[in-house]
Image: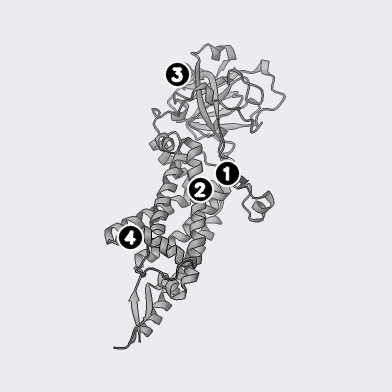
Amino acid sequence: MTDEERFRRATRRSFLTMGVTAAVGAGAWALLRSRAPLAGLPSPFRRALDANDKLAMAYFRPTRLTREYAPAKITHPRVNGGLGLSANNDPAAWRLTIQGTGGGARVLTLDEIRAFPRRTMITEFRCIEGWSTINQWAGTRLSDVVNAFPPDHPTRYVAMETPDRGYYVGLDMESVLHPQTLLAYELNGAPLTWQHGAPLRLAIPVKYGVKNIKRVGVIRYTDVRPADFWAEQGYDWYLGL
Amino acid sequence: MKRLERKHRLAIRWFHWINFPLLALMIWSGAMIYWANAVYRFLGIPLNPPQSLWQKLHMAYRLADGMSIHFFVMWFFAVNGVLYVLYTIVSGEWRELVPNRRSFIEAIQVTLHDLHLRKTAPPQRKYNGAQRIAYTAIIVMGLGSLVSGLAIYKPVQFSWLGAMMGGYQGARFVHFWLTVGYVAFFVVHIAQVVRTGWNNFQAMVTGYELHEVPND
């Protein structure tokens, strides 16, 4: 066999291999994309996000903090959504209900929240869209509230809802207990405005902005991974940073 | 008489052709993520195509979809890239790929020749100086994408990585411009492959080149 014949044979074999591989690859991709949706995504992609989350939760350490900035770095806060802020919520009637504690639900007023040690922090608020702002938050550590009103048994998750149930997020307990997770009542030195979630919202810089739920009405300890508004729309559930 | 010459080993060809669709998927899903906050500019021109174009390409309002694809394919992209680098080290092929002392002057000569500003090209070995620089730079860029990507993906857990790039927004900037770099690389790469011709291209598929040699 001459080199030319060997070459023709090798060429035929290689291009055939390449064509078959490309067809198999394209077919596999089409199959993955066409699987039945699971919370807004073809199931393999949802499962991959959940697997990534498991890895991220194993790597998470509460001692790793987000950077805190000097006051000169504060930027204008951005209003990006009004979900859960329906106008018929009377601010004077606002109460925080904590469910899953021993001896039934606890109902707290804003003054009772303010009675906890006050903490301020200037941190980066990172939106899942890609933009970020630097905000000063003042409030109480969520861990202080959890310690004062603990779950009746250790739970893995915390659910939070607006009073109108128009917006809800699910959180893992490790992120809830992170030292930079606050129930905030002030933003950039002033009480929260209506659009920013008055009178009390979550400031959780270890999560994307969508988890920083405004106007928290209900906190519920749970063993079941709680429903999450955006996770139902195809976003990752954990969204840990 | 024509003689068969072995040019690219099987492993290199597989790494190359597997990387191609994976990188394409990463750029495509990355663009869907960028759509949600298309803020970068080049020479003052906003890099934000009109909404109608995004929609025509079915890439508008797909932030969640884009993220899920990006965070799925990233594993395959990273593993293929890491295996490629390990292979070039173990096999010794890195010696043909990493620039040496002569590469930079040779790269200038090659570029001038390609732009028809110089009559002769330096003698071509497997890879010329310009190729060595390009093929090594693209690997360094790939590493940069993994590192800046991690700094964006987990900016608190890996805040030290972000700090090296000027913070979270700095890491986003690096990640974006590296992607523009891939697109630029692709354009030049394709142009050079077309210019060099079929015999060179098919060697990346078959591994062999057929050369005319004088009869003994």
Q: CA distance from mark 4 to mark 1?
A: 37 Å
Of A95 and A128, nearer the camera is A128
Task: Give me the chain letter of mark 1.
Answer: B
The crowd level at tag 3 (other Cα within 10 Å; few <14, some 14-19, many 20+) is few
Expressed as whole percent of the image width and height from the top left, the position of residue A181 reads 49, 25
Q: Amino acid at mark 2?
A: Trp
Residue corresponding to mark 4: B102
Can you say which quadrant of the picture contains the N terminus of chain B? Answer: bottom left
- Residue at x 67%, y 50% (from the top left corner): B50
Q: CA distance from mark 2 to mark 3?
A: 46 Å
Of B90 and A219, nearer the camera is B90
Of badges 3 and 1, the one in the foreground is 1
Colour treatment of the image: one colour
Q: Are marks 2 and 1 on the same chain?
A: yes
Q: Amino acid at mark 3?
A: Asn
Position of A164 with respect to B1 (left or right) is: right
Q: Quadrant of residue B137?
A: bottom left
The crowd level at tag 2 (other Cα within 10 Å; few <14, some 14-19, many 20+) is some
Residue corresponding to mark 1: B40
Task: Give me the chain letter of mark 2.
Answer: B
The crowd level at tag 1 (other Cα within 10 Å; few <14, some 14-19, many 20+) is some
Expressed as whole percent of the image width and height from the top left, the position of residue A68 reads 47, 25
Task: Give me the chain letter of mark 3.
Answer: A
**Label at residue B196:** none
**Residue B48, can we see it?**
yes
Asked if labels 1 and 2 touch by Cβ distance under 8 angstroms, the answer is: yes
Expressed as whole percent of the image width and height from the top left, the position of residue A38 reads 55, 47
The answer to which of marks 4 and 1 sits earlier in the sequence is 1
